[in-house]
Image (cartoon, grey):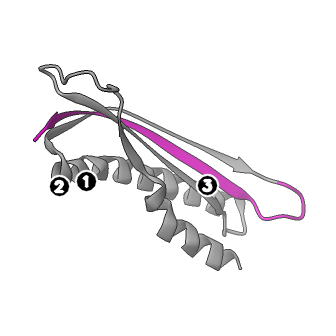
Amino acid sequence: MRVCLFCFGLVFAPLSAFAQDTTAGVPAAAGGVSFSTSISLNMPLMAPDQAGKLAEEELRRRDLYARAVGECAVLLESVAKSCTITSINVSSQTNSNPGQPDYLYASASITMQVELK
């Protein structure tokens, strides 16, 4: 069951990412348009000990940074001539309840400056 949930998170977590034009109809300035993207993960920690759980958390945080960099690639393939990441915020939290598996909640917020095609 845990492995199934873990796989579900790996497959569908990238689908939870979205890009949004935050200028709300304002014409693009000389610097381009600002895009914001958020990515969230919610998955059980599989390691039996605290050191393993910390290693899993670190791996997920690194994954979120890699995905953040990949967001510019998505915009360059679709709507952007150029893309610069101006801000990345990654956070994580572990939730432990007696008798239940520990869960990791991790999220990333990415802001990018984009020149449209």
Query: At which x and y percent is residue 33?
Result: 23, 29
Q: Does the stretch in magenta take in 104?
A: yes
> Which residue matches tag 3?
54
Q: Look at label 2 and name its amino acid.
A: Glu
Please tell me whether mark 3 or mark 2 is closer to you in this view: 2
- Residue 77's place in the image compared with 31, above or below, is below
Query: Seen from this angle, which residue lies furthest front?
Result: 25
Mark 3 and mark 1 lie on one chain; the one further toward the N terminus is: 3
Q: For the C terminus, which image quadrant?
A: top left
Separation (CA) of disc 3 from disc 1: 30 Å
Q: Residue at x 44, y 60 (%)?
A: 14
- Kindly identify which numbered label has been placed on residue 74: 1
Q: Are marks 1 and 2 in contact (CB under 8 Å)?
A: yes
Name the residue that disc number 2 marks: 77
- Judged left or right of residue 102, residue 5 is left
Q: Between label 3 and label 1, give the one nearer the viewer.
A: 1
Binning the other alpha carbons within 10 Å of mark 1 as few (below 14), some (14 to 19) or many (20 upward) gives: few
Q: Disc 1 on helix, strand or loop?
A: helix
Residue 41 in which image quadrant: bottom right
Residue at image position (56%, 66%) is: 9
Q: Which mark is residue 26?
A: none
Disc 3/disc 2 C-alpha distance (Å):
35 Å
Q: Residues within 10 Å of mark 3 (few under 14, many from 20)?
A: some
The reply to whether discs 3 and 2 touch (Cβ–Cβ < 8 Å) is: no
Quarter of the figure that contains the N terminus: bottom right
Magenta part mainly helix, strand or loop? strand
Residue 68 sits inside the magenta stretch: no
Disc 1 marks which amino acid?
Answer: Val
Residue drawn at x 67%, y 68% is 47
Horizontal and vertical percent for residue 27? 20, 22
Identify which amino acid the numbered label 3 is placed on: Leu
Magenta-tinted stretch: 97-117
